[in-house]
Image (cartoon, coloured by chain):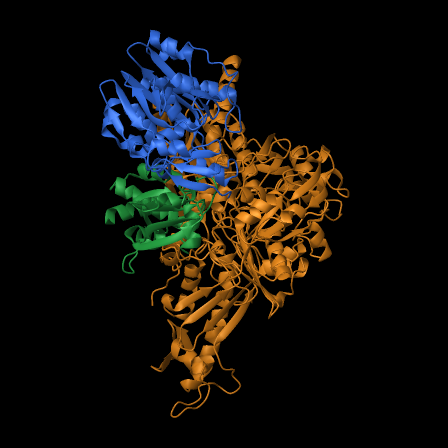
Chain colours: A green, B blue, C orange
Amino acid sequence: MKKISVEVNGKKVTKEIQDHTILSVFIRENLNLTGTHVGCDTSQCGACVVHVDGKSIKSCTALAADVDGSKITTIEGIAKNGNMHPMQEAFKKLHGLQCGFCTPGMVMSAIDLLQNNKKPSDTEIREWLEGNICRCTGYQNIVAAVKEAASKM
Amino acid sequence: MKTFNYHSAKDVKEASKLSSSNSAYLAGGMTTIPSIKLGLASYRDVIDIKGIKSLSGIKVSGKSVKIGATTKHVEVAKSKDVKKAIPSLSALAEGIGDPQVRNRGTIGGSIANNDPSADYPSACIALNAVIHTNSRKIEAEKFFKGMFETALKSGEIIEAIEFSIPQKSNYQKYPNPASRYAIVGVYVAKHKSAVNVAVTGAKSCVYNDKDLSKALSNNFSSSSVDAVRISSSEMNSDVHASAEYRANMVKVFAKKAVEAC
Amino acid sequence: MASLVGSRVERKEDKKLLTGRGKYTADVNFVNQTFAYFVRSPHARAQIKKVDITKAMKAPGVVSILTGADIANDKIGGLIAGWRIKSEDGSDMKVPAHPPLANDTVNYVGDHVAVVIAESLDEARNAAEIVKVDYKILKAVVDTKDAMSSDQIYKDIPKNLCFDWLLGDRTKVKEAFEKADKVIKIDLINNRLVPNAMEPRAANADYNPSTEEITLYTTSQNPHLARIIISAFNGVAPENKLRVIAPDVGGGFGSKIYPYAEEVVCSWAAKKIERPVKWVADRTESFLSDCHGRDHVTHAELAVKNDGTFLGFKNETIANLGAYASVFGTVTPTYLFGPCATGVYKMPAAYTNVKAVFTNTAPVDAYRGAGRPEATYTIETLVEKAARELGMDPAEIRMKNFPTQFPYQQTLVHSVDSGDYVAGLNKAMELADYKGFEKRKRESASKGKLRGIGLCSYFEACGIAPSPVVMMLGCGIGLWESAEVRFNPTGNVTVFTGSHSHGQGHDTTFAQIAADQLGVPIENIEISHGDTDKGPFGYGTYGSRSLTVGGTAIVKACDKIIAKGKRVAAKMLEASVDDVEFSNGEFVVAKSNKKKTIGEIAFACYLPGTYGEVKSPLPEGEEPGLKETSFFDPANFSFPAGSHICEVEVDPDTGETKVVKYTAIDDFGTIINPLVVEGQVHGGLAQGIGQALYENCHYDETGQLVTASYMDYTMPRADNFPDFNLGFTCTPATSNPLGTKGCGEAGAIAAPPAVMNAVMNAIGTEISMPATAEKVWKAYNQNKKRNSEAA
């Protein structure tokens, strides 16, 4: 067992965990933040993307123990004062989601894109989202939503 | 998932001391963690070396680019120094996996794992890299021994990888449409003395294609590639690509790389 | 109030899904919950000699281990085939028993052998590893084409043949072919696919010993069907003691229509151990045990006149059912396939013969489009080939054979109520700049790329119902749909639907319909679905049926509400019922200013007495309350149609092929919400293009699934697609009052042939799906070699 202290969505949390606890499991089961989803076993689908110290990572491929001391942001933590993040607003406006399962990872990944590239082209968006698989939307409205968010942020 | 004890090492010495025949070093974890999750590997101890400051960072001198083992792909991709010294190396890093993998995966982890379709091993071969470990220096040609097999001894830690700066170079790959790993990746580097053509994805281990290297050393032009016969006999064959196709792609991508140099 | 039908209303369900507040089955946890892990067969075909659980039972955390013997002891019934198909000779189809946990044989890799239930998932998985199963490995039957001549899997099923089905008239076809100037022949494989909803399947069953009721949370497109099957066929609990909840569901695409072994086992086990049992598939389990799609081997022929007129068509198909006959497994390659096999054309004579075979692979069932993509791929590549062989333009040959009078009695089964196929193709050609293709081809050539163009005109039969028809065709259930519209006393509304939304946006589109019908603001309407304890029985969501059948049930229930509202308003306004008109949420007495809002009427209905000055509003004999239910069974299927045009670019050096331009014109009848409909088309296209260029489910000759993860099964990603150009034509359906036809499957139906015709146009030779880089490279080079040898 190991004690870790992290800041999750702005709140400090200290928890006792088993050494081998995967970050996505920690987030979903220890913190009960079930917005972070798990869609595959091979770090491919991206449904589990969260931010650790501001950068997007796949939480299914990190140990909770090794983010000890970090700041974690999940999909539950990006709305401010009840207002959705511009990326969330854009996904809603342009129908960038259908079943919603890949959406949290998609949104977290897309926000990281705009941190790296304020005005990405369609091609740059599509390439950045390589690590996020969506089966419903055909990606078109996701790309449009990311562009819309870029214009608002 | 099988249990293990997690340790975060402060320095190389501590990491080395913690290691045993039943332990693994953890850098980015891009391979180690999925392997443990899928039950393909299990360890008593997992020793995290990400916190060791001396293992991270990029140093560029007149002749070489030295990259610390736990330097992340994103850092190599974005490094202005690397872009200036060996632009193909930062481009290679920019093309590994996806943004989340690049935010987490490390160069040391990639070469220690020596996946037959990983990108970095080809850079090591093409750029005459020297692998610095906590006990010695190993030339890239002697480092990659076979599929998932390297010259590293039990407990040995990669500290840095030092690449020679070539006159010009380029890396081209055809990614597996499913995994996005290289089905074939060809790294062409023209050094003062000779040209290296390193190939990943095609065989069980990265290799220097001596015929292509020789032909391009004699005449650095894509037409030189045409004259070289690439044998498919030792090439991988799987649901994604036959040996024959891979052999052809080595040629196609070698030409593309030469033309892009 | 402006009509909401036809507006791009943003989805009501999005906020929760975007903020991480969606609740999927894996997010559901119960106090005292246990975790299930299934022991699965590592062999494609084997006899189980012995299952030894002794050691595993002693492993840490293990609560229980259940096997096929326990299933048999408890008389838990097997999984069912929902449609009974008869062979051409009149005999019934032959299906093997399919126990939820295998008893004596396993028949595909991933088949369920035992379940380990433990205090934690890790403990369940670790114990599962030490359940010792002694197998006698048998030779597996894997290949679709060779299945009939391979080892016999089941004792009572010779040639591994489930049925040998015929639709159509062989004699008429023979006569038609005798009159032909030319016969075009084609041999095709419709590649096997894995549906891959992003949410892996999951179940969490809770047993309440006090009420003796099981509550099953599950990833289902169809909770009512899950309940009736688990109750009536598996015998786990009576229907009134089984509540099935499908909360937010992360995509289905057909693979979550029916219950699987895991739901049955979790429900049964929860009751047995009197503790909740939770199971969540990992992705590998999903690959192994979700039902797969497609997997046909087809030979088809088209008889034509030299001027391009079609005379007759025959289709001989072998369809792989996998190891067992799944719920929709037998209807998918028959009635969902055969009637559409002649495509969108006038075809004087036709038949479709399907031999459905068992193999040692995962069961095959409906996957987006279900039968219609296979049918459309066959006819549309055949038509394109006919155009090539006759030297005609592919658009011209299609135009020539389109029916132009509607209703049109299609050759094999359907009477198509409405359509305008000529208008659709013309619009597609215009939007795609069909005329400008040669110029674009030259531009591609200047970059060293080969450019090709491909067409597909399709029609499909969806809006799956009507019950009398589907039951006559062998369906074991009716396929109507239900709705209950419940006014709450304060005037807001809850609409219960028997269909289920798992991405389609019913919370919004159905609310748009109800808002328009009732004149109630959309914010005040809640759509409720997915809980068998809440709404009336229904048949769920698949076959593009939810709107045409389920949406219409809502309209019908609203009609009843309005009818009652008129009676109540008449009493309250002291007018005759016939003089009360309803529009925009108000009951108005004709030629007067007397009116009541529907909210006032609802309130009045719930206060049926005299209270102070307020007089009882209800007419004599009228029941209090305002709630109406409707069960709608349409008179016909609905028939969306359209024309798609695809352009690809091929790199001749590598064979890498990319869709660079895609135009889709679809006729879905009335469109409720264009935003949602466009999204449905995009998604369908991505899956169709995925089938054509990327996806392939591959078993090796021993029956091991080689493509069992995203490392090996190519899931299309964002960088695989261009932006799609969409357009619509509209001929409203006449079989439902909304005029809607269904839009969920069109993209997956039309895209594969459009893409493949474009690839073949680019490289000048035939090629099978998926057109992977290597296959394209080989086909192109072999063709080049053949041509240079010929010259």
Determine whether, in the image, residue B59 is placed left or right of residue B196.
left
The image quadrant that residue B27 belongs to is top left
Q: Residue furthest bottom?
A: C612
The image shows residue C50, relative to residue C647, as above or below, that is below
Determine whether, in the image, residue B160 is placed left or right of residue C101.
left
Residue C480 vs residue C502, the one in the foreground? C502
The image shows residue C32, relative to residue C385, as above or below, that is below
The image shows residue C538, relative to residue C400, as above or below, that is below
The picture places residue C455, in percent across and down from the top left corner, at 47, 37
Seen at 34% across and 43% down, the residue is A56
The picture places residue A80, in percent across and down from the top left corner, at 27, 57
Residue B70 vs residue C380, the one in the foreground? B70
Residue C429 vs residue A50, the one in the foreground? A50
The image shows residue C375, relative to residue C226, as above or below, that is above
What is the count of numbered marks?
A: 0
The picture places residue C358, in percent across and down from the top left corner, at 68, 41
Q: Quadrant of the C terminus of chain B?
A: top left
The image quadrant that residue C184 belongs to is top right
Determine whether, in the image, residue C84 is placed left or right of residue C260.
right
The picture places residue C684, in percent across and down from the top left corner, at 46, 45
Residue C710 in sight:
no
Residue C142 in sight:
yes
